[in-house]
Image: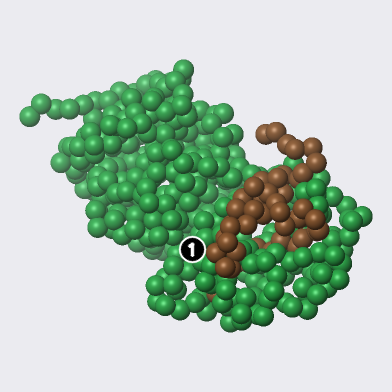
Amino acid sequence: MRDEISKIRARGGELVIVGNGAPNFAAAFREDFELDCPLLVDPELRAYRAAGLRRGRVEALSPRLPLNALRALRAGSRQTSVEGDPWQLGGVFVIRPGGDLTYQYVSREAGDHAPVEQILAALDENAEKIPEGSATPRAQVWIGQALSRLVDPFILSSFDRTGFRIHSLTFQAEDLEVDLSGRRCLVTGANSGIGYETALALADLGAEVVLLCRNRERGDQAAQEIREATGNAKVFTEPVDMSDLGSIRAAAERLSSGSVDVLVHNAGVLPDERVETGDGLESVFATHVAGPHLLTRLLRGSLEKSPDGRVIWVSSGGMYTRRLNLRDPNWNERDYDGVIAYAETKRAQVVLAELWAEELRGSAVVVNSMHPGWADTPSVKSSLPRFHRVTKHILRTPAEGADSVVWMAACPRARRSTGRFFFDRKERRTHLLSSTRETEEDRRALWNLCESSTVERSQ
Amino acid sequence: MERDATSSGVARRLSNIELLDWQGVPQRLGTFWKERPIVLVFIRHFG
């Protein structure tokens, strides 16, 4: 690396290195590599984010990285990666006096390298300035759009991680350069999978995040991890069982004292057998539909207190296969099939999001649904072991699955829509088959069903 | 979003961020490219 420094200096420039550790890491790094250039530390990743390197179109940095650094610090050792390739980059920018950007490079994979000659050429005073609307190059967006057009007709094929890679080429890095401090976000089912990644990302953007989890211990564990990884102390747990209406009422009572800016309905279940809840509801219907409906109703006032309220329903691509089922939502008449129950309730969530959007039209609260694609989460592994075995090599990471949720919760542009369905940060249609379309009457019946299922029964 | 006519988006967003250097002294990023061009490298790992 010292060789590169002399080449840079020979052209009148200087190398400035930013790392994400603590100052003592930088001091050690400096010593190990005998560097005499400026070395800065950015443990909160403020500069990383401002440069568009954090979450956005590519995972230039693993979201777990600060956590790993923390673990290493606790263990009293430095990260072992220092013994590996020091040029393992998050990104390289050449900035000329006056603030002209003449070179930018965002690392896509661990271990890829920026070409040194191009960097040196960009130091030249005649180097061409990069016209920059955002950190996402226009050609890349164009290629992403072209590829998306090619892949999206085969809708199912775009649900996998290749689909994410292609779609993410069109993501605007600036979209998630947002400061969410002062905003309060509630995420159900937040101790693992997509819920966890959503909570982690929102906390990382500065929001107060409340993890609504069935299991207090697992919730506390996740909250602790997120606090450590992000340095954000405002990450809390609220125990709630989304299939239990009484538990939801109790939690809402505690949560509704303040305003709520974001409510993410993420908690999900896929049981093998029919389970009836204490309220007499089938557990999948209770967890995905009745419970979230009740929680939304109870937090409505808190959401309306926010100048920028957002409710996000995490549905599933599986909903494309089913029509809204109102005849037997609690599986009293049919032989139980958990996968069908799952898909039917995921369809119901999409419709319910549209109905809530109508209900809240005129307020500052937007309501949308989304599907995360096929992501490799603990739930998929335990509930759909065969699906997981066959597809595990093409599944998205939970963070990739959570990307659109985070975008919908955080990006200012995302609140332009209400009552819409998203996938990979874009509005998508909600039907692929005409046979799944519901009537206006069905839609009204769903609302009534939710109301009647959640009405407080006098004991 | 409003853009500074001269400064690029990335440079403008970075310029006012203050980070600690290896000795723990706060440094404003914009000062580094005031007089000379810089190669600003973000590394994935430190230490």
In the rendered image, residue A133, in percent from the top left (x then y), is placed at 74, 41
The answer to which image quadrant residue A298 occupies is top left
Front-most of residues A182 and A375: A182
Residue at 52 percent across and 79 percent down: it is A80
Q: Is residue B6 above or below residue A121?
A: above
Residue lying furthest top: A362
Q: Quadrant of the C terminus of chain A?
A: top left
Front-most of residues A7 and A334: A7
Residue at 58 percent across and 57 percent down: it is B26
Hey, what amino acid is under mark 1? Pro
User: In the image, which lettered chain appears green?
Assistant: A
Q: For mark 1, does the 10 Å Cα neighbourhood hold few (<14), some (14 to 19), or many (20 or more) residues?
A: many
Q: Quadrant of the N terminus of chain A?
A: bottom right
Q: Is residue A366 above or below residue A385?
A: above
Residue at mark 1: chain: A
The answer to which image quadrant residue A59 occupies is bottom right
In the rendered image, residue B33, in percent from the top left (x then y), is placed at 76, 55
Front-most of residues A375 and A430: A375
Residue at 35 percent across and 61 percent down: it is A382
Residue lying furthest right: A126
Query: Which color was chain B given?
Result: brown
User: Is any part of residue A413 visible from this angle?
Assistant: yes
In the rendered image, residue A366, in percent from the top left (x then y), is placed at 47, 28
**Residue at the spot of label 1:** A66
User: Is any part of residue A154 visible from this angle?
Assistant: no
